[in-house]
Image (cartoon, rainbow, N blue to C red):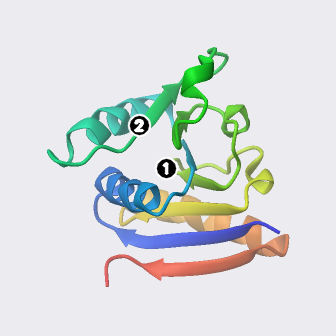
């Protein structure tokens, strides 16, 4: 069953995501990232610039876009729809809604900023997962 990890009290959602993806890549993990298109575009740009000496290999794939065979092995996919990714190890949700198809992933990571609206949305997602018996874990990022 899918394990769900909530990272709470995150002051900078995209900066935190960059660091988390860098760590995941260093550990050999493959991650699918979903969010609204504008957020994915900002994350795509940040992954190229957040650390001058680090490279986090990733691909941005719009809904319905074809991916060249030589790009398929890329470990980090920024996608509009989670199910379009070729691997389903970890799903990083940077949006405020449940991700359709989340249950096909081994692990879901929810990054929750300190702003009130995203916190309320995260509470609704937490309840959804809990009501369906998913294993929930929490990490206090702001601690």
**The furthest residue to the bottom:** 143
Please state if 24 lies on the left or on the right of 143 as rendered. Answer: right
Please state if 141 lies on the left or on the right of 97 as rendered. Answer: left
Which residue is label 2 attached to?
Answer: 39
Distance of label 1 from label 2 (alpha carbons): 8 Å
Say above or below: 88 vs 128: above
Q: Earlier in the sequence, mark 1 or mark 2?
A: 2
- The percent coordinates of residue 128 (x first, y second) are 75, 65
Helix, strand or loop under label 1: loop
Helix, strand or loop under label 2: helix
Taking depth in this image into account, of 112 and 48 the one nearest to the observer is 48
Say above or below: 10 vs 51: below
**The furthest residue to the front:** 70
Say above or below: 57 vs 110: above
Which residue is label 1 attached to?
Answer: 94
Residue at image location 29% in from the left, 43% down from the top: 55
Say above or below: 54 vs 137: above
- The percent coordinates of residue 119 (x first, y second) are 48, 65
Taking depth in this image into account, of 2 and 118 the one nearest to the observer is 2
């Amino acid at each position: 069953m899918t394990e769900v990890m909530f990272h709470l009290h995150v002051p900078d959602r995209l900066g935190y995501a960059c660091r988390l993806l860098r760590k995941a890549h260093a550990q050999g993990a493959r991650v699918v990232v979903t969010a609204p298109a504008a957020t994915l575009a900002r994350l795509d740009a940040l992954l190229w610039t957040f650390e001058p000496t680090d490279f986090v290999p990733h691909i941005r794939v719009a809904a319905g876009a074809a991916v060249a065979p030589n790009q398929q092995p890329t470990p980090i996919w920024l996608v509009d729809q989670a199910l379009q990714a070729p691997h389903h190890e970890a799903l990083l949700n940077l949006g405020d809604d449940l991700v359709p198809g989340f249950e096909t992933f081994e692990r879901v990571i929810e990054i929750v900023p300190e702003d009130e609206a995203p916190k309320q949305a995260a509470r609704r997602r937490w309840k959804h997962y809990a009501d369906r018996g998913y294993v929930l874990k929490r990490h206090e990022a702001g601690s």
